[in-house]
Image (spheres, rainbow, N blue to C red):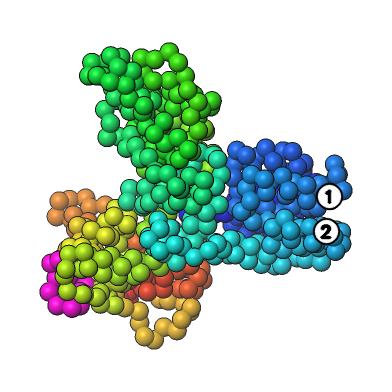
Amino acid sequence: MAAERILILEDQEQVRASLADSLQSAGYRVETHAEAEGAREALRHRPVDLLVVDIQLAAADRGGLDFLRAVRAFDPGLPALVVSGRDTRDNVFEAGRLGAQAFLSKGSFGEAELLAAVEEALRRFENGGAPDAPGSALERMLGQSRSMRRLKAQIRRFAPLDMPVLISGATGTGKELAAHALHECAPERCGRPLTVVNCGAIPETLIESHLFGHKRGSFTGAVQDAAGLIRQAAGSTLFLDEVGELSPAAQQRLLRFLEDGLVRSVGDTREERVCTRVVAATHRDLGEAVRRGHFREDLFYRLNVLPLVLPTLRERPEDLPLLADHFLREAARQNGLPARRLAENSHTALATHDWPGNIRELRNLMGRLAALCDGGEITVHDVEREAPVALPLPTHPSPSLPQGTALPVGTSSASSSRGPEAWPEAVPDFPRTVAEIRHLKVFRHEVQRAYVQHAIRLCGGNVTKAAQRLGVDRTSVYGYLGDGAGHPAP
């Protein structure tokens, strides 16, 4: 998942540069402004995850508080920190009333205090909100990883806003479930059903009449008037799944609707104003589609007001055991099968897979395992046999290696002499003859092993640090260092 975006409003150039440098060094994406008006306009076009606001601006003594007050009118859930050289009691009280998570006095905090305050504000944002309602879409979005906590917090924040949302993510990451969650978390819309349109499943010649309706006799087969799905979603949410599949003509009409809210049926001359919230989703890179001329640039920017990016399963490996166990229980319960459980090394094997099909692929695999495996425990060999793409058998860490210490990574003296930045010499070569062609599973494991070895070398041999940078747990690191046949690294 992309790094959090932070907007800084600070009119003193030196202070603004210092704040930005500290946050960028910690991996955050930073946007800076010296004036409140420019910052407000930026927020309406590019949502951020956190504000850092100076109270006293050149244009107004309490201009930062006025800015926060204006932001709360259209984005009440946005986390904020306040910095000031005037930490009066009134300023502190007013900042807290406007939802600021921390008040930092200029001259009395350093980089460590700033980063700690930012991390705490983001953590509270991710963990905030009431418990998910039983059976709700948010409750069904399983996972305790930071990326999932942040995603659910963004959904709660975006849901009540009257702006289009563009959900992007790979196939199988749960885009429709996220759309349902956005709809359910909006009090003014959740009383009406969500209207779902699969843009890729409707023929190009019919998509306009499906969306906008048609008049009787406007084309062959139009035997009666049809209101269209946009009118059906009036006062509710219209979910355009696979919006990248829309024809150029449908893109043009959708853009017009997003700009002025007017709907005109095919074959009609009258226009009608319809109020509906549009949520779109795509597995395509719409930015690339715009560059290739396959998708309208103006429509892309109209849809992408509030971007919601769903993490892939390999970006949240800590959620794998929870998801796998849940889908296994679900498959057994729904089909009247005996309860089964995954062996510990089966969880490790799942963690080494790339999961190109994401949540959907994992759910399908657990269904097969529940149906086809004998006995109460599912072994790693069961997992490897039933997986659509063979999973590498897990390996185990050497018991003599203490946690967080150097690991022998099998580097040659030549690569060591080149320094830690050098690319590892162990990267496997492509085969030069038919006889040298290895199984794809073996080659993939060799590439992964070389990359992990290089990451550990760059981290000074610290396995824990390398695992954190790679986005996996320590057990997975040791698994990648196996030789592809179940043996630990030399």
The stretch in magenta equals 369-384
64 is higher (above) or lower (below) than 270: below
**Does label 1 or label 2 sit earlier along the sequence?**
1
Viewer-side residue, 288 vs 411? 288
The mark found on residue 156 in the picture is none
* Residue at figure coordinates x 65%, y 39% from the top left: 42
Looking at numbered disc 2 in the image, what kind of residue is underneath it? Asn
Determine whether, in the image, residue 3 is placed left or right of residue 107. Answer: left
> Residue 252's spot in the image, x, y percent?
44, 22
Which residue is found at the position 24% from the left and 19% from the top?
223
**Depth order, front residue of 76/288:** 76
**Could you tell me which residue is drawn at 33 percent across and 34 percent down?**
199
Which one is in front, 248 or 435? 248
Q: Which mark is residue 91?
A: 2
> Mark 1: few, some, or many residues within 10 Å (few <14, many ≥20)?
some
Residue carrying label 1: 62
Q: Secondary structure at mark 1?
A: loop
Instruction: Measure the alpha-carbon separation of dots 1 and 2.
Output: 8 Å
Residues at circles 1 and 2 in contact by the CB criterion of under 8 Å: yes
Q: Residue 456 appears in which quarter of the rendering?
A: bottom left
Residue 20 among magenta residues: no
Residue 427 x/y as whole percent:
34, 59
